Image: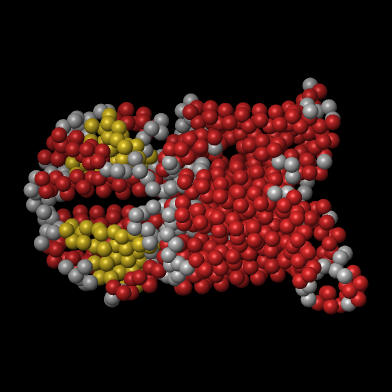
């Protein structure tokens, strides 16, 4: 009972320290929402505004139809009609177009003869993912052009036809993937920095030693430092979640209880990482550096920017200790797939292990500092 | 020396005194050596991060696990399954019922399902069979590439069959695609230069943000103000040592990109170094401004991480194409120095000295550098009066 009272007092003091200063209050509560809002729009792999140029040497009915299909797709915007091969390189080099479509002069003749007719598509590969996506779109357009051509020219239908479905995200919108993922990404950054810096500040100003000579036990100090950060984290999560649901209108399939259970475990883990960082740092500069050192790999290898399954096997094992990896999986599965608590248990127990491990290290380091 | 300073105070306030700057720089270096965490930020951190993240980041899917459902294994349906097995992109698990496949996709064991239905053969004989392609759409970008690869495997099977069965040929448009600057389609080519930007943005800003904020917090900067030292001299003394450290870090990360990740450097090394130096000054200036504006390490540290790291990931063109972003958000990206440096690095590494890209990028960075330092100078001088 006495212990609980002490912890509550410490929690109150911590919350005051972070929220009293208006600037500090703003940096804790403002950025997650602003960032989720901006990045929700910016972080998209979907293309809708691809500038392209055409070099049509055929100028036939068929080539015009092919280009009309591209223009009509809504994704591509034609910005130049070329008359010479040599015009291609400067356009791409200067990034004025992403794609150049070149149709050879016997395009229609070959089509009528029943032969494959080549279309050259040149893409600016400086960002090979964007270029690959654009080429993919053109591939789909070519497929439908071919299907129409077969039909109107009396060819037999293709032997197989792909019927495509995307589960959990029928229109394949990257935003459905990114915005829920932001819940984990944005809070990870804040949790680690806030926790690590709040301990380091006390240490640098000498108030931590004062705390140690009070009747507080190390575990109580730890709880007193963790709970305020977790509370702030829950507020941040709720704000970003609200934005995802009501502004971006991403359909939520699962249960809020399951989502919060997973997120709470993640927050405990992230705070544990922050405490571990602070327990080895003597100054605020070192604490910030330590935070950065953990945040950056965690954030980049969490699977939001590039899929974990693309990583080399060794690095995939490294991501096992990345709390972000597990929480992103949890959020996506609950959010988009409507997964139950039981189905996400395979993501929950690794998080619990990391939480236990980091909190244990922090307690141990605090104890050691006492003796 | 004291008497000389006291003798002509006027002269000391009108122009930068190299001797005072030199001693300030000396002091900063002594401090760096006493607390080596700055050296760690500048040198160890970038190398560690570029190795770990550089090897980890990749947008090139290979061995995508898919389930092929053969509800009625026949030579024809098995040959379609074979086309998926032959493809480098897929790792096939064969199952005989849709239930099994659904369980695999729910447990994250596979990312897609190719379903060849019970009456595939009958459909094929009567003129056209449909093949159901299901992808796990959660990661939409990856899903779209999986769809593309699956269509590729199917059309290869179709071509193959047309030849072996001597079917009458029909004309079709066939795409010959070429990816300039990255013929092998290796995503490291653009991810690694982007990573250099990310690391340098944060280390550059962090280096100065904290040292300056600490001096404010501990009052040592005010102690400096009662000496004849001018604000601009303090700024030079603060910037130069960290500039040298930062350039060394940049050299290490850029070399890692070139020699470890084999990103070709098509452009000139001198241009690379010059524009990188410019960018580093912008990053350092940003750190200085934050610390002078906040005068509080906690807030300065928070702002530095929030304002540099995530925007450089999501808003710089590092992975996401800015042309597809709504105009309002794209406008914000123009205020971000990282955007110009990403564009510059991707161009100088992969395309060469394309002046129509490099000059505007460098100009934007120069303007930002001037604004940042002017603002910092004002923030620092204000306190003097």
The answer to whether residue A134 shows anywhere in this view is no
- Residue in front for this viewpoint, A261 or B56: B56
Q: Position of residue A261 (x, y in %)?
A: 57, 31
Q: Residue furthest front?
A: B1
Relative to residue B9, is residue A238 drawn left or right? left
Q: Quadrant of the N terminus of chain A?
A: top right
Q: Residue furthest top?
A: A1
Q: Position of residue A65 (x, y in %)?
A: 23, 65
The image quadrant of residue A141 is: bottom left
Q: Residue at x 90, y 69 (%)?
A: B2
The answer to whether residue B36 shows anywhere in this view is yes
Query: In this rendering, is residue B55 above or below A363?
Result: below
Q: Residue at x 86, y 65 (%)?
A: B227
Q: Residue at x 64, y 58 (%)?
A: B245
The image quadrant of residue B263 is: bottom left
Relative to residue A219, is residue B57 drawn left or right? left
Q: Position of residue A209 (x, y in %)?
A: 82, 36
Relative to residue B247, is residue A194 drawn left or right? right
Q: For the image shown, how many numbered marks are present on the structure?
A: 0
Query: In this rendering, is residue B32 above or below A207?
Result: below
Query: In this rendering, is residue B43 above or below A359?
Result: below
Q: Quadrant of the C terminus of chain A?
A: top right
């Amino acid at each position: 009972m006495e212990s609980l009272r002490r912890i509550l007092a410490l929690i109150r003091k911590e919350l005051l320290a972070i929220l009293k200063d208006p600037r500090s209050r703003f940096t804790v509560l403002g950025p997650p929402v602003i960032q989720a809002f901006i990045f929700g729009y910016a972080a998209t792999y979907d293309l809708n505004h691809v500038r392209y140029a055409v070099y049509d040497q055929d100028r036939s009915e068929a080539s015009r139809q092919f280009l009309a299909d591209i223009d009509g797709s809504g994704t591509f915007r034609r910005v130049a009609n070329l008359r010479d091969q040599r015009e291609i390189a400067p356009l791409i080099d200067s990034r004025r177009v992403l794609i150049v479509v070149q149709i050879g002069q016997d395009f229609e003749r070959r089509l009528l003869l029943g032969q494959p007719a080549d279309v050259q598509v040149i893409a600016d590969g400086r960002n090979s993912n964007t270029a690959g996506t654009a080429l993919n779109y053109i591939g789909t357009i070519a497929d439908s052009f071919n299907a129409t051509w077969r039909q109107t020219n009396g060819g037999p239908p293709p032997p197989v036809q792909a019927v495509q479905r995307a589960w959990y995200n029928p229109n394949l919108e990257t935003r459905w993937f990114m915005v829920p993922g932001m819940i984990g990404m944005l809070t990870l950054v804040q949790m680690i920095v806030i926790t690590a810096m709040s301990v380091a500040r006390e240490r640098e100003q000498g108030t931590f030693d004062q705390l140690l000579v009070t009747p507080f036990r190390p575990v109580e100090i730890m709880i007193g430092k963790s709970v305020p950060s977790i509370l702030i984290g829950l507020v941040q999560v709720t704000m970003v979640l609200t934005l995802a649901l009501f502004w971006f209108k991403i359909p939520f399939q699962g249960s809020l209880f399951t989502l919060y259970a997973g997120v709470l475990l993640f927050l405990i883990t992230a705070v544990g990482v922050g405490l571990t960082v602070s327990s080895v740092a003597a100054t605020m500069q070192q604490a910030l550096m330590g935070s950065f050192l953990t945040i950056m790999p965690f954030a980049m290898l969490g699977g939001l920017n590039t899929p974990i399954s693309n990583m080399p096997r060794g690095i995939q094992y490294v991501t096992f200790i990345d709390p972000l990896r597990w929480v992103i999986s949890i959020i996506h599965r609950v959010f988009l797939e409507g997964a139950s608590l039981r189905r996400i248990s395979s993501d929950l127990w690794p998080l619990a292990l990391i939480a236990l491990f980091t909190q244990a290290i922090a307690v141990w380091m605090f104890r050691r500092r006492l003796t | 020396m004291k008497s000389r300073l006291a003798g002509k105070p006027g002269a000391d306030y009108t122009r930068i005194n190299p001797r005072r700057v030199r001693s300030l720089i000396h002091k900063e270096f002594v401090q760096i050596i006493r607390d080596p965490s700055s050296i760690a930020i500048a040198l160890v951190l970038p190398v560690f991060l570029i190795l770990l993240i550089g090897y980890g980041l990749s947008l090139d899917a290979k061995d995508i696990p898919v389930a092929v459902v053969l509800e009625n294994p026949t030579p024809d349906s098995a040959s379609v399954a074979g086309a998926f097995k032959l493809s480098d992109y897929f790792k096939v698990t064969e199952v005989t019922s849709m239930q099994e496949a659904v369980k695999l996709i729910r447990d994250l064991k596979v990312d897609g399902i190719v379903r060849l239905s019970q009456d595939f053969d009958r459909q094929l004989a009567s003129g056209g069979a449909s093949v159901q392609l299901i992808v796990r759409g959660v990661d939409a970008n990856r899903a779209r590439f999986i769809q593309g690869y699956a269509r590729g495997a199917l059309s290869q099977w179709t071509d193959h069959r047309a030849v072996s069965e001597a079917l009458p040929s029909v004309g079709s448009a066939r795409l010959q695609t070429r990816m300039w600057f990255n013929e092998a389609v290796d995503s490291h080519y653009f991810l690694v230069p982007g990573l250099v930007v990310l690391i340098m943005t944060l280390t550059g800003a962090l280096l100065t943000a904290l040292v300056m904020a600490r001096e404010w917090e501990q009052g040592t900067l005010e102690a400096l103000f009662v000496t004849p030292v001018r604000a601009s001299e303090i700024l030079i003394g603060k910037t130069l040592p960290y500039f040298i450290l930062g350039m060394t870090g940049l050299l290490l990360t850029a070399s890692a990109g070139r020699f470890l990740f084999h990103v070709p450097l098509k452009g000139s090394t001198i241009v690379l170094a010059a524009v990188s130096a410019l960018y580093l000054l912008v990053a350092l200036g940003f750190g200085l401004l934050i610390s002078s504006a906040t005068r509080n390490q906690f807030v300065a540290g928070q702002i530095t991480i929030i304002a540099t790291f995530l925007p450089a990931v999501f808003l710089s063109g590092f992975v996401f194409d800015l042309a597809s972003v709504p105009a309002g958000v794209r406008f914000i990206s123009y205020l971000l120095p990282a955007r110009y440096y990403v564009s510059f690095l991707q161009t100088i590494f992969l395309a060469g000295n394309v002046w129509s890209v490099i000059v505007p990028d460098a100009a934007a960075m120069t303007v930002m550098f001037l604004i940042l330092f002017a603002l910092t100078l004002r923030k620092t001088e204000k306190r003097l009066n």
